[in-house]
């Protein structure tokens, strides 16, 4: 679920993460003008920050830190910093960039933002939006988004070699249930939200499948290394008990997988937050059209490579058979 606060409404935010508590204290101390901050989404697995956010104004805070708590044996727990912040939503902004700093785990991010400029554009889709803006015929855009969706659905359902590579078994059945849409349905706002929800379901399926495949590789390598150590095997294998070089290898694998997923363009949250923040139906269709067209292009490119590979394999097999025939005839 994605929630976009409406401008002018008040909200209560309970902060327990140290970076959020630190930001609240800096706002109270007047470090930032007018007590303004930006609330946005951040993906846990890829650390990618959404391209849109909500400007919030801090009204007042209440310190509700908890200290003196003890464990059951009687050990004193560290103080839990807890701040309740009363805020007002000011407006939606486009997040242009994150300032480069040596951010620590308890530091909040500092970003450059632009107010009231959400027209369906993001930093990575200039080509697609130029194409959409250059076409005054909205009907053709609405028609194309449905055609691209139907093609993507067809590829996942009918291309066995591609589906077996892209999706685990549990996800292949889920793709079979994706609904179809008529060409005119993108003109209707209610139907468009159904298409948006369906596309988000596919994105979630892809994300979960990639996460599952990565976790399988990580678990397999962790168990393999743990079995080489002396003593009994302890399950589950704790990463902190693995050699440092293996821990770094696992971290590199996860970072590489996260970057690949970002480049895939199938994030099930952040792009959809931008669609929700748009006020114009046409802008939503254009943004969704770019998202679906990008996935269609990727799948068609992979299908072309698969066909080329099989044709090459078939050609080599036929050539080998011809050579065998010539050899037998010569003998």
Image (cartoon, helix red, strand yellow):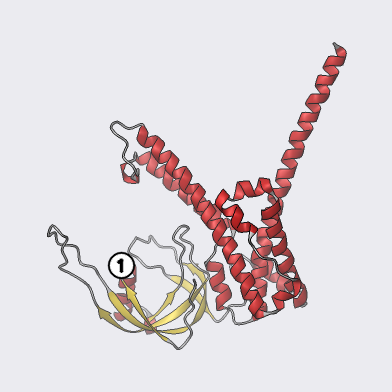
**Horizontal relation, residue 230 to residue 10: left or right:** left
Does residue 168 appear in the picture of this structure? no
Going by the picture, which residue comes out furthest to the right?
329
- Quarter location, residue 149: bottom right
Quick one: SS at disc 1? helix
Instruction: Indicate the position of residue 95 as horizontal and vertical percent values.
Output: 51, 72
In the image, 55 versus 216, the foreground residue is: 216
Q: Residue at x 27, y 73 (%)?
A: 82
Residue 221 lies in quadrant: top left
Task: Identify whether 329 is placed above or below 83.
Answer: above
* Residue drawn 54% across the image and 53% down it: 209
Give x and y (percent) for residue 313: 74, 34
**Quick check: can you spot residue 230?**
yes
Q: Which residue is mark 1?
A: 18
Residue 26 is left or right of residue 40, and the answer is: left
Quadrant the C terminus occupies: top right
Residue lying at 71% horizontally and 52% vertically, measured from the top left: 158
Residue 224 position by quadrant: top left
Categorize mark 1 by other alpha carbons within 10 Å: few (<14), some (14-19), many (20+).
some
* Farthest-out residue, left: 74
Is residue 284 shown left or right of residue 59?
right
Q: Of residues 284 and 236, which is closer to you in this image?
A: 236
Q: In the image, what residue occupies the spot 32% across and 67% down?
A: 17
Rendered location of residue 47, percent (x, y)? 46, 60
Across and down, in percent, residue 211 comes to: 49, 52
Q: Is residue 285 above or below residue 43?
A: below
Q: Residue furthest bottom?
A: 8
């Amino acid at each position: 679920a994605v929630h976009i606060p409406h401008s002018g409404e008040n909200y209560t935010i309970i902060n327990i993460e140290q970076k959020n508590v630190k930001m609240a204290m800096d706002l109270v101390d007047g470090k930032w003008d007018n007590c303004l901050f930006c609330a946005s989404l951040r993906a846990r697995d890829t650390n990618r920050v959404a391209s849109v956010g909500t400007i919030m104004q801090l009204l007042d805070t209440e310190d509700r830190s908890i200290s003196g708590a003890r464990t059951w044996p009687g050990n004193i727990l560290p103080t839990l910093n807890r701040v309740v912040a009363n805020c007002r939503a000011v407006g939606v902004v486009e997040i242009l960039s994150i300032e480069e700093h040596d951010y620590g785990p308890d530091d909040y991010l500092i970003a450059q933002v632009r107010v009231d400029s959400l027209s369906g554009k993001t930093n990575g889709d200039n080509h697609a939006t130029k194409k959409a803006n250059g076409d005054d015929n909205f009907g053709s855009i609405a028609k194309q988004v449905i055609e691209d969706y139907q093609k993507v659905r067809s590829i996942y359902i009918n291309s066995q070699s591609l589906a077996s590579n892209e999706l685990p078994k549990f996800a292949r059945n889920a793709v079979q249930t994706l609904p179809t849409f008529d060409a005119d349905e993108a003109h209707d706002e209610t139907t468009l939200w159904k298409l948006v929800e369906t596309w988000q379901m596919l994105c979630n399926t892809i994300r979960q499948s990639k996460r599952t495949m990565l976790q399988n590789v990580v678990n397999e390598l962790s168990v393999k290394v743990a079995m080489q150590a002396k003593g009994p095997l302890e399950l589950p294998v704790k990463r902190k008990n693995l050699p440092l070089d293996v821990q770094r290898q696992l971290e590199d694998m996860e970072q590489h997988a996260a970057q690949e997923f970002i480049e895939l363009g199938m994030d099930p949250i952040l792009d959809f937050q931008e669609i929700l923040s748009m006020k114009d139906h046409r802008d939503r269709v254009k943004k969704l059209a770019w998202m679906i067209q990008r996935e269609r292009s990727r799948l068609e490119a992979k299908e072309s490579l698969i066909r080329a590979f099989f044709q090459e394999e078939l050609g080599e097999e036929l050539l080998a058979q011809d050579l065998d025939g010539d050899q037998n005839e010569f003998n």
